[in-house]
Amino acid sequence: MTRTGALCLLLTCAASPTFATVLDQGEVEFSGYVIDEAPRWLWQVASPDQVWNVDVADAHLDAQGNQVFVLQDKGSLAFLEGHLKKVADRGGAGMTPVISFSSEGAPLTPAAGGGSAQDTRWRASVPVRNAQTGEFAGQLSFTLEQGMVLAQGNTLPSLDGGTDRKLGLSGMALVAGDGGQSGEVPTALMSRLAVLMGMNNGVETASVPLKWQGERIDRQVLADSHVPQLAAAYASQLSNFTLSWPQDKVPSHWRASLNVTVTLR
């Protein structure tokens, strides 16, 4: 049975007239919801609402005459996070999340040279709209980093007729293959994944390891009913924000949106 949930990130900013030195406070609003009739995962958009100031003195003009704001001071914002509610007795249906990103109903595509949506790190942008007219005003670009890990408990039950599988992992394994992430996960994100793994109820009882030893594993393991005592977690973050719009069309009020959908299979 396939269960689908959706979580949404909404970014908004109000700007005063272009002759002002400091544009009005920019509000970054996070909201979302998950629909799942029999949830095995718990999901959240992890960052609270943000309020940003943008100073026109910090903008530079690119070759196309756009004002460009490099918002490095915003740091990294935790985005979608999830973990199994408890260590699963075994793999099966409803265990495997497929995560997709979109904006304004269109799938989010990586920027040229920015990797692919299955990579642990990729660059993308979403359209910026004039909130008063709905017209296209510019774009908000960012780096998205993500990772999913799983681990197997070391206190395994008696093998069921010899069909149960011990994965032989020494710690957490990065999930890869068939839409899983490829590439290196930053240290901070891996640390967060370990924390989320610890939120799987029963990790201590099952002696689930919470350290990464560099191992990787195929995501199909999550759907395998012959694999007992599975714990899993997912985390993502946004960083390296860049805002741009034409110098002669600075919107007085702008809005951008980023949506993420989680389908459990």
Image: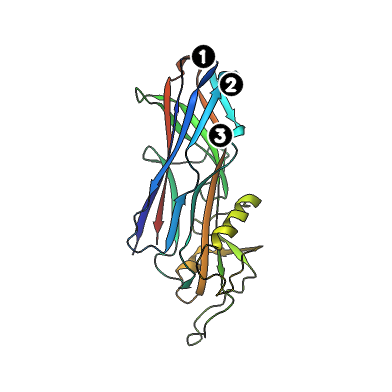
Q: Helix or strand or loop: what does disc 2 sit on?
A: loop
Q: Mark 2 or mark 3, which is nearer the start of the sequence?
A: 2
Q: Identify residue type, mark 2.
A: Ala
**Residue at the farthest right position:** 213
Say above or below: 209 vs 107.
Answer: below
Label 1 and label 3: CA atoms lie apart by 22 Å
Residue contact between numbered discs 1 and 3, judged by CB atoms under 8 Å: no
Q: Nearer the viewer, mark 2 or mark 1?
A: 1
Residue drawn at point x = 57 percent, y = 57 percent: 193
Place of residue 104 in the rendered image (x, y in percent of width and height, measured from the top left):
37, 37
Say above or below: 9 vs 40.
Answer: above
Is any atom of residue 176 visible in this view?
Answer: no
Q: Which residue is mark 3?
A: 241
| Circle on res. 20 | 1
Residue drawn at point x = 42 percent, y = 30 percent: 255
Place of residue 52 in the rendered image (x, y in percent of width and height, measured from the top left):
52, 30
Q: Helix or strand or loop: what does disc 3 sit on?
A: strand
The front one of 103 and 252 is 252
Place of residue 46 in the rendered image (x, y in percent of width and height, measured from the top left):
49, 48
